[in-house]
Image (cartoon, rainbow, N blue to C red):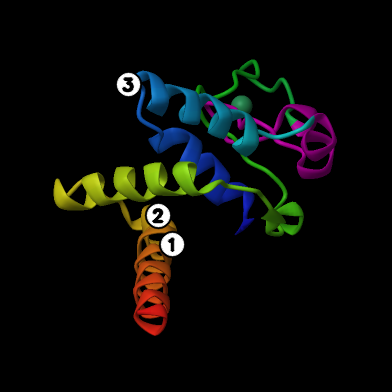
Amino acid sequence: MQLTVTERLLLLNILPPQGNVLMLRIIQELKTTLSFTEAEHREIGFWSPCVDCGKEERTHSIDGHPFVPAPGRVNWSQEADVPREISIGPKAFSLIAETLEKLNKSNQLQLEHLVLYDKFCLEDKVSERLLVEEDGHRG
Ligand SMILES: [Zn+2]
C-alpha cells in the first residue's frame, strides 16, 4: 500500500497502546513497518522547529533565545514526502480499520484522519464486497 510520511506518522499515533497478545504482536510489527529507516531519515530530513520561533536548528540564530526543539513536533521536506510502498498484512489492515472505525463511532476522528479512513475503511468495505461477489460466482 502506498503511504506518505504524514500518513505513516498519523498511523503510528493512533495505534492502540493496549490490547490482547495477538493485537500487541500485530501492533509491534506495524510500528516497525511504519517507522522510518535510516536511509529514509536522511532522505526525508526530519527536523524539530524551535518552540519559540519555529525555525530549524541549523538556521537558528542565537538572537535573544536559545534553540529549544518543540516537543512532539516534527517537520520535514514536503518534496521528500512521496508515497512509499509499505507492506501491510491483512490482520494489521483490519486492526487499523477497526481503530479508525472506533474513532469514527466515538466522534474522535480528526480532519487529518479522513484520508486514512478513506484508505482503510472504505477500501476494506470494497474488498469485502468483492469477496462476497467472488463467493457468489462460486456458489
Ligand atoms: Zn527560536
In the rendering, at what x and y percent does residue 64 appear?
63, 19
Q: Are marks 2 and 1 in contact (CB under 8 Å)?
A: yes
Cα–Cα gap, marks 2 and 3: 28 Å
Residue under numbered circle 1: 115
10 Å crowding of disc 2: few (<14), some (14-19), many (20+): few
The amino acid type of the residue labelled 2 equals Glu
- Which residue shows up at 52% across the image and 24% down it? 28
In the rendering, at what x and y percent does residue 16 appear?
35, 29
The image quadrant that residue 83 belongs to is bottom right
- Which residue shows up at 48% across the image and 23% down it? 25
Residue under numbered circle 2: 112
The amino acid type of the residue labelled 3 equals Asn
| Closer to the eye: label 2 or 3 | 3
- Which residue shows up at 41% across the image and 33% down it? 15
Q: Is mark 3 within 8 Å of ligand 1?
A: no
The disc, 1 or 3, on the residue closer to the chain's N-terminal end is 3
- Does the magenta segment cover residue 86? no
Image-based side of 4 in relation to 124, left or right: right
